[in-house]
Amino acid sequence: MKRFYFEEEGIHTQEFHVPLYRRASAQDVFFIGFGLFVLSYLIVFYLISVTNIFIKNPMEINISAMFQSPSFDHLFGTDFLGRDIFSRIAKGTEAFFLPGLLSITISTACGVLFGVLSGMYPRFASKIISYVLDIVDSIPRLIFILIIIVLFRPSIYLIMTFVGVTSIPKITAYVKAKVQVLKKQGFIESSRALGLAPTAIIFKHIVWFSLKSVLVIHATLGLGEAILIETSLSYLGIGVQEPIPSWGNMVAMGADYFFQGRVWLSSIPAITITVTIMGLYLLGDGLNAIYNEKVTR
Amino acid sequence: MSLVAELKKLRVYFYDQKDMRFIRAVEDVGLQVERGSVLGIVGESGSGKSVTARSMMGLNSGEPGIIGGEFYFRPRLESRDLIEQALSRGLNATSYRRGELLNLYHGLDRYITFRSHPFTVIKDAEKWIRRNSRVMEQVRGKNISMISQNPGSSLNPFHHVGKQLEKTIQRFSSEEIGDAEVRERALGLLQSVRLRNPSEIMQQYAGSLSAGIAQRMVIAIALASHPNLLIADEPTSGLDTTNRYGIIDLLSSIMENRDLTLILISHNIRLVELIATHIVVMYAGLVVETGSTRDVIKKRLLGHRHPYTEALLSSMPTDADIKKGRRPRATWGSVPDNKLVSNGCPYVDRCLHARGKIRRKCRSVRPELQELGSGHFIRCYLYYR
């Protein structure tokens, strides 16, 4: 009620700490809700495909049921070999789910470590870390992925490890900037004056209290990016190979039949990719909007 | 008379990366704090009060500055062994002891070399910082606690203030205590700092507290660790007048109830005068006058007071002074730049008393602290015998 009163007065007051539910605008609520919906169906699809409790087997070829348009029997229709597209989309999450998590874990863990080190101890660590990360940052990602595929093997785990490593510099820069602001705050000095050990200050007061929201946001954005890279590689035919479904190779295979009027073969996986990535990015945006409170008065 | 802390010839220099040289922040500062007494440090901003306090806490070490001198401190019995362990590490001598006092800066001189012409300081920074922080980690909190300048920013903005107080109580209690016990102690502490509805305030965030309440909260957190020595660095600077006297009154009542020694730092000499037993007046990184409050402030005879103390007092006249027709008088000029270290007295440019031959002497040679009465020292040629 108080908040409406202030808005009627035409005074926009930003309270220092406003509860989360009061900070969120209608747009933020929509973004976050949409993002959570996307996340939940990703998790459900993944659980279905690991436990293998499909209604229709995604790998089963049925020549008599080729090119069926969406119906109650086949929710998203069937493809050129009569396989159920809905089940294949569910199965397709397997291609990026764990590799994506791997990439996020690598980038956030190393990013936080390097960011905190170079933010807290600028004399000792900052220069060498920034040199190394500048080199990593200058690597053209897609070309190097192709080189990796040529040199080793087209393993999605290898590719996602590389993606994780190349997104370390971004997170490091963010964490470093945040740590540099936070460590000059009075409450950090007060906790030092109270005799708290430096490691406790770094991990409790800086990383856990102040950075966890940032990390959640970066993780969502990172997952979106991982999906994008996996699908684009599979679309180009250098990611997941054909009988095993992936959203990217489903689009590529279905594209041949697009102008025959069988649009669902390629457009349904394509729409799924769009909605999913948009959902994850919007989730990051919404969280960013409500979590980014001012640190100083 | 038993001392809690004694600072001898403290000097702190900061490194200016732009000009590639050291800047004097504090030089030749000495002070003694007796057990149960209140020591007031006064001076304008830039006179080195906060630097003195922060180097007593070991909080200056993060920057590439240097600290020299001796800091004798009487720690609590239970933490004495740990401090001695940290002090004797790498050294076989026990020269850090002086009676019950321990020299917390012992062994730091090894890493620093002074050269006077040209003035340079060579310092092994990493070893210096490591040793200093190892010793000071044992001292901070349990032995020395600090109330810093801005109460709002010294509380974590992301958590309930009550939680921060409870965590501090848990951390410094000698035995394991349950949540209910912790909460009870927290409420007791908050009542002792005269907060009216403690259980409501504990639910709030730092940003939604008013400055006076936040300062009381900070004092409660500082007291939760049962310190020997409490350093209050401008505890009243952001507060309105009534709250200001409330905090000073609170501090003096806390002093009565606990075994606590207080160092009160302020630029407001009239406020310090209220509770301090001894006063140190600082100017441009030097102690210009020190003694008991009676000696420094109440003696009316000119000839027993430093011109700078005179200027501080006349800029804030009391009611009695105003009745006599003494108006507040501003001193012209400001604190000299720390980069321009002169050989003479730093106050000479603003001094209205020194004339003629004495003034020429003031410009060329820096005066030393001279004892006037018992325990009353002054750094001025006007009163040299």
Image: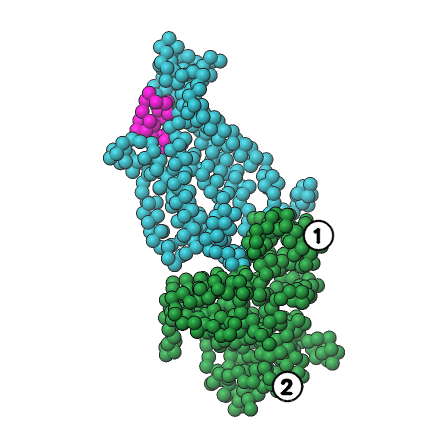
Chain colours: A cyan, B green
- Residue at x-position 32% and y-position 29%: A239
- Between A246 and A25, which is closer to the camera in this rendering? A246
Chain of the residue on which disc 2 is drawn: B
**Tag 2's secondary structure?**
loop
Q: Residues within 10 Å of mark 2 (few under 14, many from 20)?
A: few
- Residue at x-position 64% and y-position 48%: B180
Chain of the residue on which disc 1 is drawn: B
**Tag 1's secondary structure?**
loop
Residue hosting label 2: B302
- Residue at x-position 39% and y-position 49%: A114
Q: Residues within 10 Å of mark 1 (few under 14, many from 20)?
A: few
Q: Position of residue B117 (x, y in %)?
A: 37, 79
- Between B342 and B71, which is closer to the camera in this rendering? B71
As drawn, is B95 to the left or to the right of B36? left
The answer to whether residue B175 is magenta is no
- Residue at x-position 49% and y-position 53%: A201
Q: Quadrant of residue B234?
A: bottom right
Residue hosting label 1: B197
What stretch of residues is rendered in magenta?
A: A227-250
Mark 1 in CB contact with mark 2 (< 8 angstroms): no
Asked if one can make out residue B13 in the rendered structure from this viewpoint, the answer is no
Q: Quadrant of residue B226?
A: bottom right
